[in-house]
Amino acid sequence: MASRALSWISVSLLFFMASFSCVAARSTRAPEVADPTDGFTALNLGQSNFELQRPYDEASGARYSFDGTVRKMWVLSSDKPHARQSHTMPRTEIRITGHDYSSGMWQFEGYGYVPSGTSGVCIMQVFGASEAGAASTLMLHVYDGALRYYDRQLVEDNIYNRWFKLNVVHDVDGSVLTVYIDGQEKLHVRGRGGHSHYFKFGVYAQHHDSNRMESHWKNVTIFKKN
């Protein structure tokens, strides 16, 4: 009787330990990340939808390269603006054409990479605003390795020298923008109005810009809510 009781206790103990191990393993798993594109439809993008803006006195190959997968854009703080009549800061940006919008829910998705040393620069923006003095409803700047909402709140730290997945959702009717990094929500802010919008990415010099600014992009997709 004693040996059978002991066996039963041993079996029960082993079962408890195995169950505890399973629960512990489940609890240490990384939380599942929701896909921000759920409920959205990807739009067709051809090369004609990627309009390059670069210093007006430079050939495209002097500030831009595309190997069929990765688009690399760079600009110098001493460069001219993108148009002779413009008084804006130097830039090498891609402007998404053919998909300007004024209502509904739209989304930008792309994989970005910022080399160390790049600072004081906008790497992605949602153009169009109605607030006084504003041209964009959202800008993402890089300062000393930190990705920020304009030059304000932190969106993601330690952005240098790694690929990150960026999703920006713009609810025009609700005037709200949500930013995801690697599938995790990092920013939720009010928009700045505007009657027409479009997406841009690349490098656009801001305050305290470094001598050279560079960003790389791949798998850029535009989505619209169904």
Image: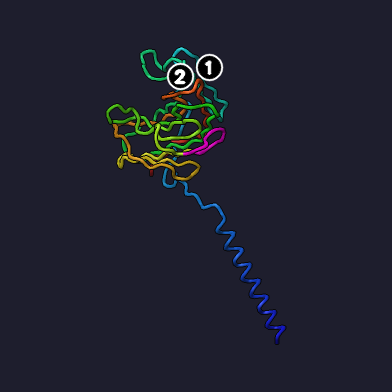
Is 132 on the left-hand or right-hand side of 166? left
Q: Is residue 174 visible?
A: yes
Callout 1 touching callout 2 (CB < 8 Å): yes
- Residue 121 horizontal/vertical position (percent): 45, 27
Q: Residue at x 51, y 52 (%)?
A: 32
Under tag 2, what secondary structure? loop
Mark identifier at residue 54:
2
Q: Is residue 48 visible?
A: no
Residue 142, above or below 5? above
- Residue 223 horizontal/vertical position (percent): 42, 39
| Snapshot colouring | rainbow
Callout 1, which amino acid? Ala
Q: Place residue 1 in its image quadrant.
A: bottom right
Residue 4, above or below 98? below
Q: Residue at x 67, y 75 (%)?
A: 11
- Residue annotated with mark 1: 62
What's drawn in magenta, residue-wise? 156-165
Q: Residues within 10 Å of mark 2 (few under 14, many from 20)?
A: many
Is 3 on the left-hand or right-hand side of 84? right
Callout 2, which amino acid? Arg
Q: Residue at x 46, y 29 (%)?
A: 123
Task: Check residue 220 for magenta coloring.
Answer: no
Is 71 on the left-hand or right-hand side of 39? right
Q: Residues within 10 Å of mark 1 (few under 14, many from 20)?
A: few
Q: Residue at x 36, y 16 (%)?
A: 87
**Residue situated in front as seen by the camera: 174 or 68:** 174
**Residue situated in front as seen by the camera: 52 or 163:** 163
